Image: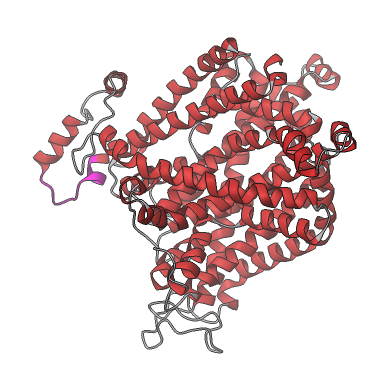
Amino acid sequence: MGRLVAHRLLATLPVLLLVTAGVFALLHLTPGDPIDAMMAESVDATAKEALRRELGLDRSIAVQYAAWMGRLLRGDLGRSIRTGEPVIENVSRRIRPSLQLALMAMTVSLLVAFPVALASAVRHNTAVDRAGTTFALFGICMPNFLLALLLIFLFGVTLRWLPISGYVDPLEEGWAGVRSLVLPAVTLGLALAAVITRTLRSSLLDALAEDYVRTARAKGLSEWIVIRGHVLRNALIPVVTVLGLQLGTLIGGAVITEYVFALPGVGRLVVDAVFARDYPLVQGVILLIAVGFLVSNLLVDIVYGWIDPRIRVR
Amino acid sequence: MAGSIRESAFADAAALSALPAVRDRRWDALRRAARARLAPFGAAVLFAAIVVALAAPLLAPYDPYAQDLSSTLSGPSRAHLLGTDNVGRDVLSRVMWGTRVSLIAGFASVAVAALAGGLLGVIAGYAGGRVDGLVMRVMDAVLSFPPLVLALALGAVLGAGLSGVVIALGVVYTPTFARLMRGQVLSVKTRDYVEAARALGSPAWRIARQHVLPNAATPIVVQASLSVAFAILAEASLSFLGLGVQPPAASWGSMINSGRGYLQQAPWIVFGPGAALFVTVVGLNFVGDAIRDGLDPRLTR
């Protein structure tokens, strides 16, 4: 197990280095002068020169990269050129809504996927099953932003049950905060629920056909105990696999969801920074997201090895 | 070889799918049965979309840019089948013109990715050693960004507009094709007929063209057909965020975004292009599945 972790960590390092090079190159790939893209034409030349010097754009590329890496290693991700605020502070302020959204979406997806997949598998080849699989197909093909607007139209505009935008912190305002996150969490959670349902249904069906399930039934255990104790546990491993592979899609979905519902999260920050052509901010946030993504993938890999010893031996 | 975590994630997924518990047999059987009926529907949708895209100037009842301020936000009627938007433009005509943008973005970005990825994969697989290591680590680096986030960042650099979107999405999808092609090259490279060709003195490029490419074509085509639906969704997402195709050009994503302020008074501005997008993506998924089943039954995901 320790070797597995060390091996994966080591393999990640060169990729991480390339990622930093790529993020650094972003600014230099810009056609034309990045300073002109960031500042209005009316800004006078001395201010532009000052920014150019501050960003180090007057030095050679190699020197700039070395300096940038040096600052990165000291935890300095640069400053937003609009607000002057350090990138790291900006992100840490916005990470809370994003994590809350992710957590609630995950809850929604599990609350939806487990009953649907269980019903589908237990009532295999019936109308219940067909409804379940149709739900999965639609959930996978439905664009995130369209689902968001459908939910807003139905629950926000027509029924007026839930707020359609804005963010209230559930940790401070309690119930009002939870309400403000319901529609975003359902938007993000349903797509994930569709993928989980599909995987879980088929792995449940496979587990239900195993000999040990017949044995368990034969010794007189109730169906619920058979499912809980023997079927469900064995059916869970593929779900972890799929969750790992879906992580990137989930982050992309969070960006769109935060945009539609005006949640002040990290995803919204990316979109705003790109809009404002605030390149240092874009660089910093993208780098942090990539690192977070790499680390999560690493964790998923380690979790596999932990749940299923068969994989470790490979 | 020390693989990246992504690579090993895929390897793990592959190892898992070899275990009986993960085999999607029943799901696959059900899907195959359903597909027999769904593939024609998918093909019909794709055909209709291509016809509409090509003939948009002839089919569209109105000029997609013509504003009619005397009939803004009017509901579906005989004059305007899908209603009009906030400046009185005909939604149906804009949906038709938007089909062009969606199909061009979907097919062109996948073509870019297949070409670039295929070329990189051939180079990596054929050269081996350090070149292989470098190329594939770069591909890993591209994969360590969530796809949409990378497309956003590249879009910021390349500038908004259809060509920027196509290049950005092309880059995002390149590693998938590079990996696929590299794997094919590695497996073909050791075959006897390639050894024979090399012994006869064929240059590398000729071996690649005559022996490797024909063998690798099938999985590339299958992957490409499945990727188009995702690329169309991605273009719509970028345009929805305002970072793809720019207004007033008609793109489904940007139409949906501009209509979201009028959900209450005029939901048809959102639902016209929304329905077009959803039906196209579902149809393309069916077509992609059918192509996969037809060309290579072994390739079940």
> Which residue shows up at 65% across the image and 58% down it?
A138
A36 in the magenta segment: yes
Instruction: Tell me: A282 left or right of A53.
Output: right
> Which residue shows up at 26% across the image and 25% down it?
A76
Q: Which residues are magenta?
A: A35-44
> Which residue shows up at 46% across the image and 74% down it?
A158
Q: Nearer the viewer, residue B245 or A131?
A: A131
Residue A68: percent from the left, percent from the top? 29, 23
Residue A89: percent from the left, percent from the top? 26, 35
Q: Is residue B184 above or below residue A101?
A: above
Residue B301 visible somewhere in the drawing = no
Colouring: secondary structure
For the N terminus of chain B, the image quarter is top right
Q: Nearer the viewer, residue B199 or B157?
A: B157
Residue A209: percent from the left, percent from the top? 86, 39
| Total marks in image | 0
Q: Is residue B151 above or below residue B211?
A: below
Instruction: Tell me: B23 left or right of A106.
Output: right
For the C terminus of chain B, the image quarter is top right
Q: Nearer the viewer, residue A100 or B48?
A: A100
Residue B65: percent from the left, percent from the top? 43, 74
A202 in the magenta segment: no
Q: Is residue A260 above or below residue B118?
A: below
